[in-house]
Each structure stands twice: as C-alpha cells, then as structure tokens.
Amino acid sequence: MLFDQKIAIIGGSSGIGFALAQTAADAGADVIIGSSSQAKLEGALAGFKERVEGRLIDVTNEESVSEFFAKIGEVDHVAVTVGASYEPALVVNSDLSESQNPFLFKYWGQFLVAKHAGPRLTVGGSITLTSGILSQSPAKKLAVQASVNAAVEALGRTLAVELAPRRANVVCPGFIDTGKLLAEVAPPQRAAQLLELKGSHLPVQRVGQPKDAAAAYIFCMENPYVTGQVLFVDGGSLLT
Ligand SMILES: NC(=O)c1ccc[n+]([C@@H]2O[C@H](COP(=O)([O-])OP(=O)(O)OC[C@H]3O[C@@H](n4cnc5c(N)ncnc54)[C@H](OP(=O)(O)O)[C@@H]3O)[C@@H](O)[C@H]2O)c1
C-alpha cells in the first residue's frame, strides 16, 4: 500500500528512523530522510540504491523546518523519530536549561514538523510522531523524558482532530536496541548482557529491534481507520 507513496522521515539517519526508511523503501515508497547532520545523512544514504533521498533539517529551527517542507511539497506520510540526549537527574537536583532541552528537540521539534507538514499532507495522508514508554511508567531521574513523551502523546491526539481527515498517531517504543547501550561490549557478550538487562523480564523474552518499531509506523501509515492512537511497541513491558 505504500508503493509510490512519498514519505518523509525526520530523524531517519539512524536507529528507528533508519530502519523505517529501509522498510518503507523496500515497500516501494519514495523516501526522504531528514537529518541535521550532512555526514550522518550521507552515511545513511550509502545504504540505499534507489528511491531514497536526503535533506538537511534542524527541528529546533522553525525556518529550517519550513524550508524543508516547502522544498519537498505535497507528501503522503510523515514520521518523526528525532531524539536528543539527556543527562538523567532527580527533579530536586535538576538544572532547568538541561531539563528543557528534550522539550526543544522532541516536543517542539515534532510540533514544528506537524505545523509545516500538516498543510502539505495529501488527503488520506498521515503523520506519525514518537513518544516512549516512560510516558506510562515512572522512573527516578527520568521525569523530563516521561513528561516530554506524555506531551507528545497529547499532541498526537490533538493533531488527529485538527488535521482530519488526514490522520495522526504516535508510536511509543519500549527499549529498542539501536546499538548505543553497551556499545563498548563485544557482540556475543553484549547480546547476553542486553537480554539480561532489557529483555529477559519481558513477556516476549527478548529486546526490541529497530524493525519491530518500524513496523508500527508502517501500520499507522497504511491503516486508513487508525487515527489519534498511541501504539505501544514495548514487548509487553507495561504488563510487568
Ligand atoms: N531506542 C529506544 O530504545 C527508544 C525507546 C523509547 C523511545 N525512543 C524514541 O524513539 C526516537 C528514536 O530513537 P532512536 O533510538 O532511533 O534515536 P537515534 O538513533 O539517536 O535517532 C535520532 C535521530 O534524530 C535525528 N536528529 C537529532 N537532532 C535532530 C535535529 N535537531 N533535527 C533533525 N533531526 C535530528 C538524528 O539525526 P542527526 O543527528 O543526523 O540529525 C537521528 O537520525 C527518539 O524520540 C527516542 O526518544 C527510543
């Protein structure tokens, strides 16, 4: 169903977004990867033979977001998988500007993408945002991540109402192994340690892979009766 559809993936140069770009291109879509780093963009594009192009975009800068969507024009589906690093801290020990940073990237970044992509979505088109499982399960030192994810989920539901009949959804990943955690450990030991740390307690008894998350964005794009939803891809972590 995505054959010949135009799909923009903001944050598609690595991790979940890159897996989504691969899945969408395999399905015959014309994919535009957006990323803020020329080097990362070139690295990502080297993994594709056709149907995928790259464009620079900085979601923290409205002019950059506006230019990106003005250049690509009408688009069928947009997914945002932008992430930002964050130093965990108890609320009582937190630094305000450090705590505001994830909102700048992950909330206001997705807000700006929705603002400028919304008017260019085809009828039948969709936008899919990204939150994270911390929106549902509190953990010490992660109040900011929990809050930004909850805010993104509220934004997604509002967009579903405002952009209708275009659709808006949010994918909420649990732990997905994008290679960053325990990166310094050699592969066989890393797999075992990762399973122990992040997978063995889950109902599915394994860690999530980027393609597991990618499949959720594809579902949100393809199913014309799904809007205003938060789709959890967490291996059942909320049940434990
Ligand atoms: N992986 C997990 O376990 C997990 C769990 C829960 C939620 N999530 C959420 O899922 C999303 C993707 O996670 P991931 O692990 O795939 O992260 P990732 O590999 O770090 O990918 C993040 C992407 O965002 C792009 N980006 C960063 N700053 C940007 C900016 N200013 N403008 C445009 N693009 C920018 C990065 O590309 P450039 O650096 O090239 O710009 C990169 O392509 C994040 O929102 C994350 O919080 C992930």
Image (tube, rainbow, N blue to C red):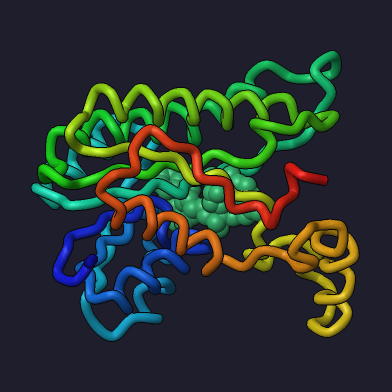
Q: Position of residue 175 (x, y in %)?
A: 69, 54
Q: Position of residue 13 (x, y in %)?
A: 43, 62
Q: Is residue 60 visible?
A: no
Residue at 25% of width from left, 65% of height from top?
A: 31
- Above or below: residue 128 compared with residue 115: below
Q: Is residue 106 visible?
A: yes
Residue 29 location, quadrant: bottom left
Residue at 41% of width from left, 71% of height from top?
A: 44
- Above or below: residue 138 compared with residue 23: above
Residue 110 location, quadrant: top left
Q: Position of residue 18 (x, y in %)?
A: 45, 66
The answer to whether residue 148 is left or right of residue 72 is right
Quarter of the picture holding the N terminus: bottom left
Task: Give the total of numbered labels.
Answer: 0
Q: Position of residue 53 (x, y in %)?
A: 24, 68
Name the foreground residue: 235 vs 18: 235
The answer to whether residue 211 is left or right of residue 4 is right
The answer to whether residue 181 is left or right of residue 145 is right
Residue at 66% of width from left, 52% of height from top?
A: 234
Residue at 63% of width from left, 64% of height from top?
A: 178
- Above or below: residue 185 compared with residue 163: below
- Above or below: residue 132 compared with residue 218: above
Q: Residue furthest front?
A: 225
